[in-house]
Amino acid sequence: MLKILLNGNQLETEAKTLEDLCRSLGYSNDKIATALNGEFIPERNRQDAVLTRNDKIEIVSPRQGG
Amino acid sequence: MLDGPDKNNSSLLRLYGEEFSSRLLLGSAKYPSPDVLRQAVQESESEIVTVSLRRESARDKSGQRFWELIQHLDITLLPNTAGCHSVKEAVTTAEMARELFNTNWVKLEVIGNDDTLQPDLFGLVEAARILTERGFRVFPYTTEDLGAAEKLLQAGCEVLMPWGSPIGSGRGLNNVYALKTMRNYFPGVPLIIDAGIGAPSHAALAMELGYDAVLLNTAVSQAEDPVGMARAFQMAIKAGHLSYQSGLMESRDMASPSTPIAGTPFFDLQNDS
């Protein structure tokens, strides 16, 4: 199990890549965008983004804004 | 150089090569319900609506529900970087927004102070430069500072969005003199008042000053009747723009009767008394 920080919260995951993580969380068909340690990771690159201990991951979605 | 106010031919708003008939840009936040948001957008006649992005929760998936609503509104989306306090945060947020909303337009906010929500102008210019180099069309939320405005244009911005007053304050145009100066200083640049508008009269004044458009959110979404207020803003902005095109009279310090003096009854008697 890998300890990571997902959207500011600690999480233990068996996911090896960002793509695995998104799938394990049920986001496969959802409108989301991702960042790893402050860097944007496009959808096409998520499978190449290997997770390591203490990675900080952001998974965001559309929201109301002014 | 750039598209901007032209009293003789300015029925359409031109932003980064695209044309719009509405000069009201509407925010999508803080409405009492999704249906009220939908009705307010329709009643406002806005063609550009601002949106944002936030952390998604696997539990409630609120982002997916909002996406379902917003993609059926037949509008142009303008994602913002609200809440970003650094250049890096703003740039990464913009990149995530570009993928999420499939647009290279971004309303760039780099916040410098949490109490006033005023922009960090130094960070704003730097982020605008980076994003423009990466193919974004940047709508910078700025102040009326002319030096910062020059730098933003040099960084590649073709639109400027000075605040009227602090975000969400509803105070209207805090510094009319500076906003007039900005309008006159950049006659060819599309200028949009962004933030601080509280009443349709504020928006009308902005348009009478020659601003190209107004961006607002809270004044509509937090009104007692957001749908009615959306319509009121739509009318005020049209009225303000038409009055700018029609040329306002010069104001005077002294009174001047509008009814002709010649032929006034009892004129001599008044003068003799």
Image: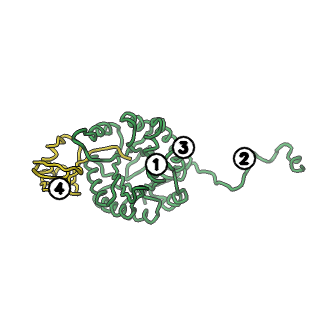
**Circle 4 is placed at which residue position?**
A55
Q: Amino acid at mark 4?
A: Asp
Question: At 41% from the left edge and 36% from the top edge, which residue is drawn?
Answer: B42
Q: Are marks 3 and 2 on the same chain?
A: yes
Residue B239, numbered circle: 3
Q: Are marks 3 and 4 on the same chain?
A: no
CB-based contact (under 8 Å), mark 1 and mark 2: no
Labels 1, 2: front one: 1
Labels 1, 3: front one: 1
**Circle 1 is placed at which residue position?**
B214
CB-based contact (under 8 Å), mark 4 and mark 1: no
Cα gap from disc 4 to disc 1, whole angstroms: 41 Å
Cα gap from disc 1 to disc 3, whole angstroms: 13 Å
Q: Is residue B152 above or below residue B237?
A: below
Report the chain shown in yellow. Answer: A
Q: Amino acid at mark 1?
A: Val
Query: Foreground residue, A3 or B228?
Result: A3
Q: Secondary structure at mark 1?
A: strand
Cα gap from disc 3 to disc 2, whole angstroms: 23 Å
